[in-house]
Amino acid sequence: MRTLSNIVGAAFAATLLLGPAACGWKSDGQARLDGLYHPDNGPKDAVADLGTDVVVPDSPDGFAADVVPADEGGFDLSPGDVPATGLAGLWAVRIVQLGEISPISDAYPITTPDYFLARVEPGAGQMSLTFCDEIPVVDTGDSGLAFVTSTTPALRDALGKVPVVVTLADSGASLPAQKIVWTWGLQNLAEADPLPTSGTDAKVFDQDQDGNPGDTVLVEGLASGKRYMVKRAVWNLAAGTLSGDGTRLSGTLTYTLDEEPLGADPTMLDQKTPITPKDGSTYLLRRVGDLSCATLLQHVDEVFAP
Amino acid sequence: MTTGAKVLGAVLVLATMAEAPARAEGWSDRLSISGSIQSDIRYVTDTFRGERPGQGHEFEMNRNDVNLRLRADPFDGVQAVIDTRMRYYGFNKAASLPELIGRSKIDPFDLMLNEAYLSVRGLPWSKMDIKIGRMIQTWGTADMFNPTDNLNSRDFSDPLDYTGKVPNQMIELDLYPSDWLTLQLVWVPVFKPANLPPSAVQGFAMTYNSRGEVTDFPAPPLNADGQTKLMGLKDRLGGASGGSDNPLAGVHFTTPEVRTINPKATLANSQFGARAKFKTGPVDFSLSYYYGRFGFPVAYTAVADVLSPGNAPAPSKFVTAVNELDSTKYNVRYIAEIMYPRMQVIGADFAYASENQWVPGFSAEAALILPERVDFGLEAFLDGQSILRQTNPNVPTTPFVKATAGLDWSYHDWFYINLMYVRGFFDEFNDKYGIHNYLVFATEFKFKQNEVQIRFAGAFDGDDKSAVLYPQLTWIVAPAVELVGGYMHFLGETQPKNSLDYAGKSKFGMKANGRDVAFFRGKVTF
């Protein structure tokens, strides 16, 4: 009898200890509304509702069809009359960073493309890149093992409000080699400063205004949820090469990437997973006629086809 | 013959066929049928708890139930149970000429399979039983209010019955390592939510005046900041009232709806429970653990799409119902979503029964609930532009306790009393409404060798001072035949003083509880 009591007691003691630790659950109503009613934001917000299905009753105006993000904005890849010199016009921009990441024990290749739109006025000395999205892909070699990180609508909006400035040379006719520092959730940070490790650090600000420090990214994988983090990417762009028809501007880059987690929900996602850069990172700008972020993201393969 | 009747008939025929050869082979002792027939008629006695003022003084229910339970013990240690209920609702639902041709609309009914399971005792170990099938579990030692009892969601389809549960498919293992200890493990693969009473829709319904105009909309679970923002929107809509005494007279609400978000049928969303029951002398106690979801929904999102008078619906096409617009008013479509939050429940309960007739029996039950955090999201659009966004926690991550403690005592055969303190009603989950504290009571006087029974029961909410009273008079006409007359009456405000205060709703006063009804019921069991 004593043995059984001990077993039962141990089982319930374990339950009491493990129970609270297992509760990292959260359902975010605002994220769900963003996914449903802000078409530009795309359906990725469903990550906020992991494990649930919505039961939509018959609706006279076809609600289910309408929640699919609309293809707002034009989609015209023809740039029209390309000026003989200069980079004036609208550009779709992709900066691809190759690296290696170890989310658990093994190292996996990671490809991190950042997508932007940029409009260059004739003769301008710079182009301002407006952020559209970052869509990293971790190649685990196992379809059952995935590590997916994605941005929230609020983060995309917030990053989109802070253009990344690229200097042009030759009266706006070429893209010279240059270094660009791009930060997420950081302010007043010198390039050499270490990243802050606390959400209360004055250098950290709630850029996406979601009430959490830094920026919030959504994570799906062995554990799913949200990670609050800051990030600094330093791109060393080689000079760009303009194609003969003036529609593509391409080059290579090296980069460094520092990320610091400042919290997570569930807390097990509050882990630092450094990315080690690998050779082969590139950037490509495609001159287009009319494009929005939404259409760019829906047609990335077509837009950046060789 | 209707489909339901055929099914019920088949059950009866199978039972009869099984019994016929069984007699010859000595199986008659291995089959048993029991059941009941119950007729229930109810009349609404109020005129202010309905959707609109003046509704009431009408029959609410005219129901006939046939319950049948078949139990078979074909072999030693093997048992099969089928428990069915056929219910005829007694109200004509035919609304067109073609519907008058068939019986299903004129005489609507449904057939329920309450339980259907197989039980194998003593396998694979002599001190182990296995049950598989559709079952109803009852955990906890308290009377009705069992916060540790979560494997089956509640069935509140009958507002007068607080004991019903929604059956579900499950696998149960029972282990009996000693005569004082029982271990129980239950796995429920697919979650099923609670069955709500018809009046539940009032919890999310608009408030109307006698002219049919909306006078208020349901309060979302907002914090003070959100309430201020929503008040601002309400004031803005009130600008079109044209001097009416109703500030929302210039607002036309189109097709408000509440959608449920159901868990996917995945392994991670299945439910699991473990319980250890101990029996030591006059005290029974148990410890339990549950992993799953809360059976009652909590508010998750709400979106209102507002269209200015005369505006075309194009800008925000995904919400506004195009075909219901009133071009002279603000048109508003309101869609809310509710969901079933995940939870873990760590429970303990005990019951004490004394052999001394002067000492009352005691029971207590407590559940520590570790909930999923639910952040409520609200958004309003005006002519396609987002004008209000608000999010705040509805259910915090903080663990909370629901508990019941009570005593019962009877004096000979003619007096019985049960008093209970209840923390947390069935549907409370520490959302913005909070957890309330209740006094629940029931007392019975029995006369003429129990032929006549007077029962007075009720519940009082100590937080908002609302109550429900439930007197009954029962006459046992014959040993298995009873006639019961009674009344259920709710006390409390139907609307909170601050209509935007989610927590200000009166527990028993709000319309979602149902109507004040007088009832008469006849039942025979066999």
Image (cartoon, coloured by chain):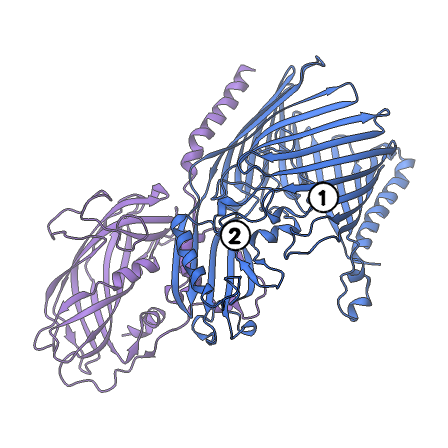
Chain colours: A purple, B blue
In the picture provided, is B446 more to the left or to the right than B47? Answer: right
Task: Give the chain of mark 2.
Answer: B
- Between B103 and B280, the residue placed more toward the observer is B103
Indicate whether A289 appears above or below B24: below
Q: How many marks?
A: 2
* Residue at the disc numbered 2: B338
Mark 2: few, some, or many residues within 10 Å (few <14, many ≥20)? many
Image point (60%, 53%), residue name? B202
* Residue at the disc numbered 1: B114
Residue B463: x and y in percent read 53, 36
Residue B223: x and y in percent read 41, 48
- Residue A169 is tagged as none
In the picture provided, is B406 more to the left or to the right than B474? Answer: left
Q: Would residue A109 be seen by someone viewing this image from the given angle?
A: yes
**Quadrant (top left, top right, bottom left, bottom right) of the C terminus of chain B:** top right
Indicate whether A64 appears above or below A184: below
Image point (67%, 18%), residue name? B360
